[in-house]
Image (cartoon, helix red, strand yellow):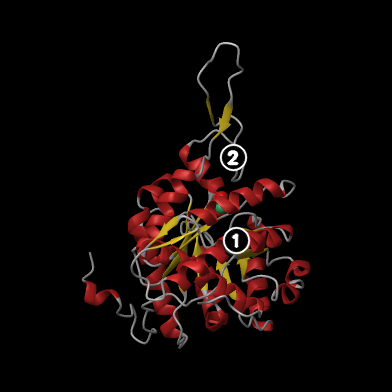
Amino acid sequence: MKLPRRFFQPLAIGAPEPLRALPVRLERMIHFIPPHLEKMRAKVPALLGEVDVVLGNLEDAIPADCKVEARRGFIRMASETEFGRTGLWIRMNALNSPWALDDLVEIVGAVGAKLDVVMVPKVEGAWDIHYVDQLLAQLEAKHGLSKPILIHAILETAEGVKNVDEIAAASPRMHGMSLGPADLAASRGMKTTRVGGGHPEYKVLSDPVPGYERRASQQDLWHYTVARMVDACQANGIKAFYGPFADFSDEAACEAQFRNAFLMGCAGAWTLHPSQIAIAKRVFVPDPAEMAFARRILAAMPDGTGAVMIDGKMQDDATWKQARVLVDLDDLVADRDGRPGASV
Ligand code: GLV
Ligand code: MG
């Protein structure tokens, strides 16, 4: 393992210093754009006020014969657009694919100064992050970039889940991680064609009681993985995200999936369809009643120590920290939406 004092050294002569902490940014949704389609690129300027992150997707869902066009389309879109406070990301092709190297070389060369984050699919272990880390440092140095490009891993293989802690800690370039339920289901041999959400057959039955029908309760297929991902990310000061929800016709189920992720500690989710943007905006913000209570906790404990009772519930240093999480997030949302914050 690398010595701690070398962890924050640039990996190439002339590359920018790695960041010590993540930039504070609201990232409720990572909105996917297929950049080979001119019609979709044309919609991007109108999306900028609507979404927190625009991601040019180069990987799955882009046909093999459109990969080069998608990369060129992304470069065109990035050059022609002023993104302001909206993040600009790519999802590159997998590291073992014929397109991965050119994705990074061409995109960083052409529009690296505008690119915030590279999402790397099918990450299996820290070695994948180390490779992209080194290559990005060389490219940043070559093109004189002053701001390091961050790395976001997709957690979507059984091996990746096994190595999730090492992936999260692999580099100061790590921005965060997203759960990829489709590839992960395939990699694990799960018996489902769904992309995220529940499955009616994944359930527990209540005990048999004579004269009563047994109740079946559907369980959350993704609970274990989201929990592991959130712990790995938060322990390393990076962010966890829920990934895709593919049934665009079932907005209620999408909202439930996003909400579970939010409550468990995720910062946002992918939006693959415009209808999911509003869902992410509803979900990835503190609940107003919870916010009002959080504000009362902070007001009652100005220095964050001691114990007080509010509505019969005991508050102490730990609940003060819980309240802080909500108020800090509300401040970020308020800032992005241009309304006064709730900060205490
Ligand atoms: C996303 O990439 C997934 O495989 O679910
Ligand atoms: Mg995938």
Q: Is residue 64 left or right of residue 132?
A: right
Residue at (75, 47) in percent of width and height: 249
Q: Can the viewer see residue 287? A: no
Q: Secondary structure at mark 1?
A: helix
Q: Is residue 190 left or right of residue 62?
A: left
Q: Nearer the viewer, residue 267 or 322?
A: 322
Q: Residue furthest right?
A: 39
Q: Residue visible at 48% across and 42% down?
A: 187
Give above or below for 13 relative to 68. Answer: below
Can residue 210 be seen?
yes
Question: Disc 1 marks which residue?
Answer: 289
Q: Which residue is rendered at x = 71% and y = 50% of the image? A: 251
User: Front-most of 91 and 181?
Assistant: 181
Read off the residue under disc 2.
Answer: 198
Q: Amino acid at mark 2?
A: Gly
Q: For residue 307, what is the image quadrant?
A: bottom left
Badge 1, how many Cα within 10 Å: few under 14, some, many 20+?
Answer: few
Per the model, the C-alpha gap separating discs 2 and 1 is 27 Å
Q: Which residue is at 62% across, 41% downward? A: 194
Q: In the figure, 312 relative to 215: above or below?
A: below
Left or right for 257, reference 36: left
Viewer-side residue, 2 vs 226: 226
Instruction: Residue type at mark 1: give it.
Output: Ala
Question: x and y percent of residue 287 in the render?
Answer: 60, 61
